[in-house]
Amino acid sequence: MGAKDTVIKTVTCDGPECTKHSMFDGAEPGVLEKPEHQWLKSHRIVRAADGRHMFYCSDICELKGIEKGVHNIQEAPKVVADGSQAAIALAAQAAANAKAQDAAIRAGQPAKVQLS
């Protein structure tokens, strides 16, 4: 008796709310002809600009992924180190000053600008 190496493949649709999932022996001939694996014949693979891959079973699931923004590059969450009331008031004042200076420059008025 000898050992047999097998490669089990697992394929899952990345569509939101989709439950399609197949698991099969990668070396098994005619695996796509089985009724439970028919959906694999019409699959789509989408590669995002940041290197992520999405696997969809149909156009419908791909469209649902697009609607949910799955293909968009995810921005890193903005971390607020100091969320105290004083820090919030200071940030709001800085934003108001920047807006006022921008309006003055656009109106041709003298403005004080700080570059950092």
Image (spheres, rainbow, N blue to C red):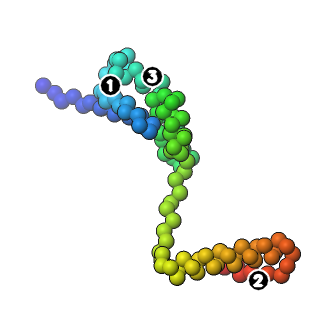
Of helix, strand and loop, which one carries label 3? helix
Which percent across, then down, holds residue 16?
A: 44, 39
Three-letter code for the amino acid on which mark 1 is drawn: Ala
The numbered dot on residue 112 is 2
Q: Which residue is mark 3?
A: 41
What residue is shown at x 34% (from left), y 17% (from top)? 34
The numbered dot on residue 27 is 1
State which tag comes first along the sequence, 3 or 1: 1
In depth, the one of 115 and 31 nearer the eye is 115
Three-letter code for the amino acid on which mark 3 is drawn: Lys
Which percent across, then down, holds residue 48?
A: 54, 44
Question: Mark 3 against mark 2, which lies toward the viewer?
Answer: 2
What residue is shown at x 74% (from left), y 76% (from top)? 100
Three-letter code for the amino acid on which mark 2 is drawn: Lys
Q: Is residue 1 at all visible to an observer of this figure?
A: yes
What residue is shown at x 37% (from left), y 30% (from top)? 20
Local packing at callout 1 (Cα closer than 10 Å; few below 14, some 14-19, many 20+) is few
